[in-house]
Image (tube, rainbow, N blue to C red):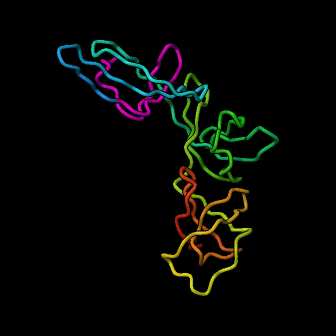
Amino acid sequence: MAMPATQIRRGMVLVFEGQPCRVIEFRHHTPGNLRAMVQAKLKNLRTGSSFEHRFRAADSIEKADMETHELEFLYQGGDTYHFMNTENYDQLEMDDEMLGDNAQWLQPGMKILAEYYDGKPIGIELPQYVVLEVVDTAPVMKTATKTASSKPAKLENGVTVNVPEFISTGERLRINPSTGEYMDRAKE
């Protein structure tokens, strides 16, 4: 679907030189007596590389036709991650390169959203939080309060995050997978 370059918005997926690219940042710019332009920072969804491109206001851009499907993570075998489409039960594989930093947060049975372009998955969206157990951290200090400083804690998936001083080994925490930050104790 073609549209003018002035319609570019953050998060939009465009087809740029035959590749699906997500708009990371954009800025409309009209310098003095020159023509208007849109300066955009794009990320190629297949290769993961980021680049900048200047579109003229008169340029026509193509919005990518994306599909979204819910997948369930089944298991990991080496560098390959196996998923099942919850709508039609088809199974598919993704590798470390395709998943990027999201791979470290996957747990068996986790439901995720996958973006498809031309019938192939090109990226995933994790849930808002994951619940993980602390396997190693410094002992609790008696004087620790909720506003105290933080300390590192190793989680069951091997990731180390900063947590408040009152957190102890064995506790289950809610972690934001997109930022890798501690949210709160799990209430389960």
Q: Is residue 124 above or below residue 48?
A: below
Going by the image, does 184 lie left or right of 3?
right
**Residue drawn 65% across the image and 33% down it:** 98
Q: How many numbered badges does the structure rendering display? A: 0
Q: Is residue 179 above or below residue 155?
A: above
When asked about the image quadrant of residue 90, the answer is top right
Quadrant of the rendering where the N terminus is positioned: top left
Whether the magenta-drawn stretch holds residue 75 is answered as: no
Which stretch appears magenta?
3-26
Q: Position of residue 146 (x, y in %)?
A: 50, 78
**Residue drawn 52% across the image and 28% down it:** 50
Q: Position of residue 171 (x, y in %)?
A: 66, 74
In the foreground, 170 or 165: 165
Q: Is residue 61 above or below residue 92?
A: above
Q: Position of residue 60 (x, y in %)?
A: 34, 13
Going by the image, does 115 lie left or right of 63?
right
**Residue drawn 47% across the image and 17% down it:** 16
When asked about the image quadrant of residue 44, the answer is top right
In the foreground, 188 or 183: 183
